[in-house]
Amino acid sequence: MENCIFCKIIRGEIPSKKVYEDEHLLVIEDVSPQAPLHLLLVPKKHFVNCLDMTAEEDALVGYIFRKAGEIASKDVYAQSGFRIVQNNGSGAGQSVFHIHFHLLAGRNLVWPPG
């Protein structure tokens, strides 16, 4: 998408603090972290949110969750716990309308969230 901020970051038009990148996924530090570890896992293919996805993306979602676990394990957060969040729509807190997953860790993540 032409004006999507995450698409611009993926294309290299906007700088970011990259943690990981491959042909399917970009992982960056959140510019407004809500925990000591707050990363954004952004698929390179543009979707607004999960309502915009089809069965063709099932493997991509599994890949993203597996990669989140690998990253959390490298930063030793797998032992203390971590959270993966994906918001759908502005009422749920989605502010960038390109699907992305928040990886949060390093503090007590209470339940229920919000």
Image (cartoon, rainbow, N blue to C red):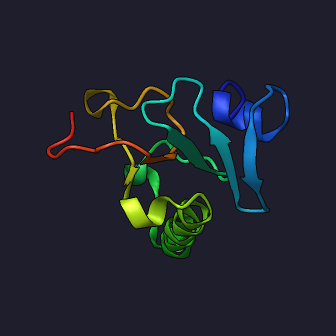
Decide which of 104, 21 is in the foreground and name it: 104
Question: Which residue is located at x 66 percent, y 53 percent?
Answer: 45
Image position of 48 with respect to 66: above or below? above
Question: Which residue is located at x 72 percent, y 48 percent?
Answer: 19
Relative placement, left or right, of 72 versus 2 is left
Image position of 23 with respect to 35: above or below? below
Is residue 4 in view from this perspective?
Answer: no
Report the label total. 0
Q: Quadrant of residue 11?
A: top right
x, y percentage for residue 29?
Answer: 63, 37
Decide which of 87, 33 is in the foreground and name it: 33
Decide which of 5, 15 is in the foreground and name it: 15
Question: Which residue is located at x 37 percent, y 59 percent?
Answer: 81
x, y percentage for residue 18?
Answer: 75, 43
Q: Residue furthest right?
A: 12
Is residue 29 in view from this perspective?
Answer: yes
Question: Which residue is located at x 56 percent, y 43 percent?
Answer: 39
